[in-house]
Image (cartoon, coloured by chain):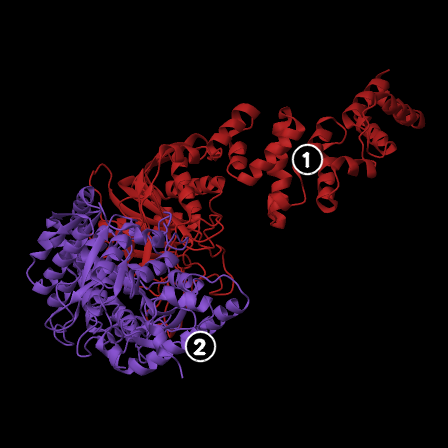
Chain colours: A purple, B red
Amino acid sequence: MADRTLMHMTAARLRDAIARREVSAREVAEAALAQVEALDARVHAFNQVTPDLALAAAERIDRMVAAGEDLPPLAGVPAGIKDNMNLLGTRTTCSSRILENYESVYTCTAVQRLLDAGALPIGKCNMDEFAFGSSTENSAFGPTRNPWDLERVPGGSSGGSAAAVAARMATVSLGSDTGGSIRQPGALTGTVAVKPTYGRVSRYGLVAFASSLDQIGPFARTVEDAALVLQAIAGKDPMDATSVDEPVSDYIAALDAGVAGLRVGVVTDMLELEGCAGEVRASVERAAKAFADLGADVGEVELPMSRHGLSAYYIIGPAEASSNLARFDGIRYGYRVPDAEDVLDLCMRSRAEGFGTETIRRVMLGTYALSAGYYDAYYGQAQKTRTLIMREFAEAFERFDVLLTPTSPTVAFKIGEKASDPLAMYLSDVYTIPLNLAGLPGISVPAGLCEESGLPIGVQIAARHFDESTMFRAAAALEGALGLDMTPPLVRET
Amino acid sequence: MAKDRLAGVLERYEAVIGLEIHTELTSLNSKMFCGCPVAFGGEPNTRVCPVCLGMPGALPVPNEAAVEATVLAGLALDCEIARFSQFHRKNYFYPDMPKNYQISQYDLPFCTNGRLDVEVGEGDAAYVTRIGITRIHLEEDTGKMIHVGGAEGRIAGADFSLVDFNRAGTPLIELVTEPDIRTPEEARRFAQTLRTIFLALGISDCSMEEGSMRVDANVSIRPRGASEFGTKAEVKNMNSFKALHDALAYEIVRQADLLDSGGRVVQETRHWDAGAKRTSALRSKEEAHDYRYFPEPDMVPFEFTDEWIESVRAKLPELPAARRDRYVSDLGLPKQDARLIADDVALSRFFEAAVQAAGASRAKPVANWVLGELSAHLNATGAAVDECGVSPAMLAELVVLVDDGVISGKQAKEVFAEMVVTGEMPGAIVERKGMRQVSDEAAIEAAVRKVLDENPAEVSSYRAGKTGLVGWFVGQVMREMRGQANPAVVNEVVRRLLEQ
């Protein structure tokens, strides 16, 4: 009988326990698979569970242990992988009917680096179709449920990756973040969630949503684990021309340095936004006070341009997506209508039947925004807004080392609550989107539980380009000061 | 027929032609955005990878050698090189394009505003015309489709279609000219001249037959003296220089007939049918695109420094026109011969090596051999000059043997034929076959005396006035010397001794 309590250990502790031969990697893999077996029928974090891959990876670690070799940093750590990242031996569906049976023909660079670091691939995590959404309800294979309340969404689009970590079915996981798709589900599931600097992690093998915004990053239950994962996957990749050849600093070494003298800017006008729940605002203020108590130099800043980020994002994101998704045409792979009359009919109907509603909406939005006669008014204008937002952040970072904002305006909402109101759903990412537009790194850290609903609330810490070290340092200090227990009731009960 | 009527039409109308030329950078080791090799043909779908097949998640990484080759082409054509440039996506659906967008360039091409001086016509009718080059940009080629069944091998109406992605992602440069071309002959000469330049740059094999150089033309006509452009048609599918010329000639006459009969030209794309010798309109449904260009977000823009551009300029080889001028001024070759050699990189290299070995004073006879026997040999065997069995050293030695009078021109042709087969040096062949021509006057005089002594009757007849016999004596002497005597010396000695 597998010992599922192993799944309460952090990645850092698991690796050490395996290195000290207190537990084998195989036992850890079995614990993760048993936890999936016990909970995933209710949570639906995974589209595909990969016991063979997990056990084979565990066997490699155990052989290294037997041979007395040094273990890699994530040796024996169960990991979930968002289903838009290619991994040989798995299907990569993007939670879309059009890729339901698509088998990866190569492995994503970030995933390969995670596996090279010794992680055990537990499975492919559910998501909003092609990452279009903030609730994981837009999955062709059914929604993922929030382990804190199974009637509620885990956020999205990386809801499966977030729920898998929150429910202890994976110790860490990879998500992708285009407008908040890692950080917002991180906040809604009480996990630590990181969107790295654009160019910090290779996108090769990540099925593209919006190429100029997409970035892969980790979910974990502690800041240290998140830093360990980013350390493993970061760095230049010759297969991604937008990955940057900037040295990856030692994130772990910086974690305990504290925040004395660190200049923390609270973005006050974001707190004033209509729709920001009072408890969310209170959490940010509590976090600011915690930083001040730790000796940080806390001040206030306004980012008035950032409120236009949402509009710019819903032009740029769909525009790039409409082009990125053009390759799904039923000709070389993926769903193909069985009774096409000619090639045009084949292409059009395979897409119409293979894509879900939100995907079709985004492709149409993007196609429209790029059309002759509309380009300047939409795409051109959105890019100008993007430049202004970048400039505004650059100025803010002259005064502050990190910026503090809410991650999401609300706690997890009920399944179906916003499904019929795309604009309300789009507002979920109002605090996270500006960082994608500016290419900046951000982390969502649990900052409390809503008194009324008992649901997690996260705050977002943003840092300068490629300054993930400072971001992690601030996040670790806050984590330590708040000392929260983020175990969902579902995990406690089972 | 169109060709016969062209001159008449061009008396009344002026043609306005602009070319759009796509050239695959076939000399590169890898495709535009991945590591797959660049080659022609092969088993379908064998030179492919996730990137050039557009598999989910694959990303393009630009081939820097292709960027450099494009800039090199721009510098060779006096273009301005952009300091800031980038790729754009050109979005349209077609099954030969794996991503359903083509990575191309839009408003920031690598090269703009160049020119090429083209020589047209021969002799007194020759003239030079300057053709402006609007832009040269870099993009990726598409795959190839085979349509089975249906009409005309087109996708519409086919029973089924097959796609070969071996060509997909091959680096392709697109050159667009200004509408500066006025006749089909100018268009042909522009394309031919451009080809010699690209060959000299070593960036492409420029094969119109294999499709590594593809020429499309925009053509319109206007009454002589008019300043406004007429409505243009775009002509495609011209697979040779002759096809380019003939298609334009046809199209100009067709448009003139339309206007003359009170009709008007429709802006459309027309397909040249080389068999039927006519253009026909493509279905308009196949055109009319909104390509929704936007900057390629998978790559960062290019920022070229002056230093980098100058480092590329330093790699510019001598271009055919400069080489031809040098052959004329430094080596004294006739202009036509100089051009024939200079236009061909490999032939030039051979020629210059042979001149180096034979001495610059022998450049003319070397050129004669290169354009004569050697070219005939290359045509007959289809071999490339680098692997035809004749080396520059061999040809140089042969020229020297003739020039020094060791063998006659007639003997030299025998030696050439022999060395092509055996690969021996010409000197060795001359020795082995005992072909060495004798010019030594003493030896020849001995042979002449012998012939005169043996034929007293003929000597008497000559001295009696039958001077025509001189040829007969020369023949006898040549036979006596087994044909190896220098005929000019024999002739002189025979006359001298007979006159004594």
Mark 2 surroundings: few (<14), some (14-19) or many (≥20) residues within 10 A: few
Using residue B4 as the reference point, say whether residue A167 is left or right of it.
Answer: left
Residue A149 lies in quadrant: bottom left
> Subunit of mark 1?
B
Q: Is residue A5 visible?
A: yes
According to the image, label 2 marks what residue? A52
* Residue type pointed to by label 1: Ala
Secondary structure under tag 2 reads helix
Using residue A74 as the reference point, say whether residue A279 is left or right of it.
Answer: left
Tell me residue A482's x, y (percent).
Answer: 20, 61
Q: Which mark, residue A69?
A: none
Most distant residue in the bottom direction? A1
Report the Cα–Cα distance between label 1 and label 2: 68 Å
Q: Identify which residue, A433 or B462, lies in the foreground.
A: A433
Q: Which mark, residue B393?
A: 1
* Residue type pointed to by label 2: Asp
